[in-house]
Amino acid sequence: MNRLRYFALCPASLLAAWLFAGCSHTKVTSSWVDPALGAKRYEAIMVVAVDERADVRRRVEEEFVRQLTERGLRAAVSHDRFALADIKEDKQNAAGAMREAGFDAVLVVRLVDTRTLVRTMPEFRPQLALTPYQFDPAVPYRSWTAYYDTSYAYALDQARERTDEVLVLESNLYEVPAGGLKWTGHTETFVPEGADKPEKLRAFVRTIVANLAENRVIP
């Protein structure tokens, strides 16, 4: 695990970009699609979340299945068919079982890293950044004394630490039963302290499914 310290007044930081982006807290940092894929599309996908925490595996797989099914694809979870250790023990058997069940691809998702972000957050957050209209002499912040008063109040404020996380995940889609890699995507998901984790999971899955569609891996 990486432990990073961020401060509130760091507008150039990646964290600030995440905080004020407004919509999704998941971004694709890299993706690749097999150039030989051609016109082939995968419409029957089994999802394997490689996480020994049974509840986490179940939630991730079920959310992928829900969103893939909404797009008209056939999708299924794997947790009710295979234990992770059984897949490791006999991968050919697992691939054969997936093919026999009518699946032409398997989406494997795993957590690569978790970064902990510790930030100093004052209780009082004045607007310190100058916007163009504030250069008008009629605006109070045009006066350095007014600006100083606000800044001084900010400096005296009681600070508290908040701990956020960035989850780094890798998602790979392989053809069944041959096993060739057809698409891969790396993502980073910002999870603020006290965040609605189910919503963050939905946003992560939406991002992956959208990237699969944009790369014409799925219809």
Image (cartoon, rainbow, N blue to C red):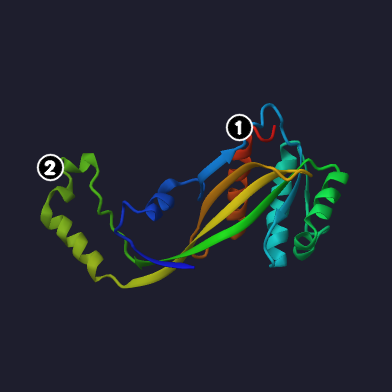
Q: Mark number for residue 120?
A: none
Image-based side of 40 in relation to 16, left or right: right
The one of 159 and 30 positioned closer to us in this rendering: 30
In the foreground, 141 or 74:
74
State the image coordinates of residue 7 (x, y, percent, origin top left): 33, 63
Disc 2, SS: loop
- Of the 4 image quadrants, the one containing the C terminus is top right
User: What residue sits 60% from the left and 44% below the top?
Assistant: 184
Taking 181 as reference, is 168 left or right? left
Residue 58 quadrant: bottom right
| Residue beneath the point at 71% across and 65% down | 55
- Gap between marks 1 and 2, in whole Å? 58 Å
Where's residue 18, x and y in %?
43, 51
* Count of numbered tags: 2
Q: Amino acid at mark 2?
A: Pro
The quadrant where residue 68 appears = top right
Q: Which residue is mark 1?
A: 35
